[in-house]
Amino acid sequence: QVQLVESGGGLVQAGGSLRLSCAASGSIFGPNAMGWFRQAPGKQRDMVAFISSGGSTLYTDSVKGRFTISRDNAKNTVALQMNSLKPEDTAVYYCQAVVAGQVYWGQGIQVTVSS
């Protein structure tokens, strides 16, 4: 079993920054693919950023140039640095990990960007 715990969300004004962090624990063996998803009210959960076990990254178009995903393999953590935040970034953000073919989710953390 794998547990994921997110931290760092909150309320910020448009143009501001937040840093989300996700700590993984449990049956973690070596680097794994991890990512951040978000879900706004009434919308589906969508991928925001992804980092492979080898460190390759992928971003959804709307956050390119503003968000950066990074990982610390020694600590089993993944972070999402979010800059130049916009009201449309408001959502619940979820951490995801893929371990041995199994997908795990964190409990989600609220990010609210005021205009």
Image: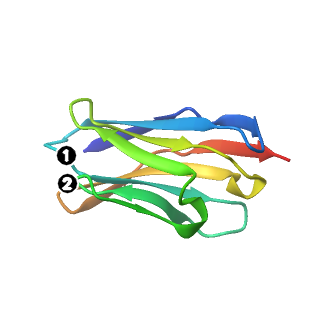
What kind of element bears circle 2? loop
Q: Does 36 sit above or below residue 24?
A: below
In the picture of the structure, the residue carrying the numbered disc 1 is 31
Q: Position of residue 7 (x, y in %)?
A: 52, 32
| Callout 1 crowding tier (Cα within 10 Å): few <14, some 14–19, many ≥20 | some
**Element type at mark 1:** loop
Image side of residue 31 versus residue 94, left or right:
left
Question: In the displayed structure, would residue 33 be above or below residue 13?
Answer: below
The kind of residue on which mark 1 rests is Pro
Residue 52 sits in which quadrant? bottom left
Q: Nearer the viewer, residue 115 or 94?
A: 115
In the displayed image of the protein, which residue is found farthest to the right?
Answer: 115
Residue type at the position of mark 2: Gly
CB atoms at circles 1 and 2 under 8 Å apart?
yes
Observer-nearest of 99 and 84: 84
Q: Which residue is mark 2?
A: 54
Name the residue rendered at 68%, 60% in the picture.
40
Distance of label 1 from label 2 (alpha carbons): 8 Å
- The reply, left or right, for residue 12 in relation to residue 100 is right
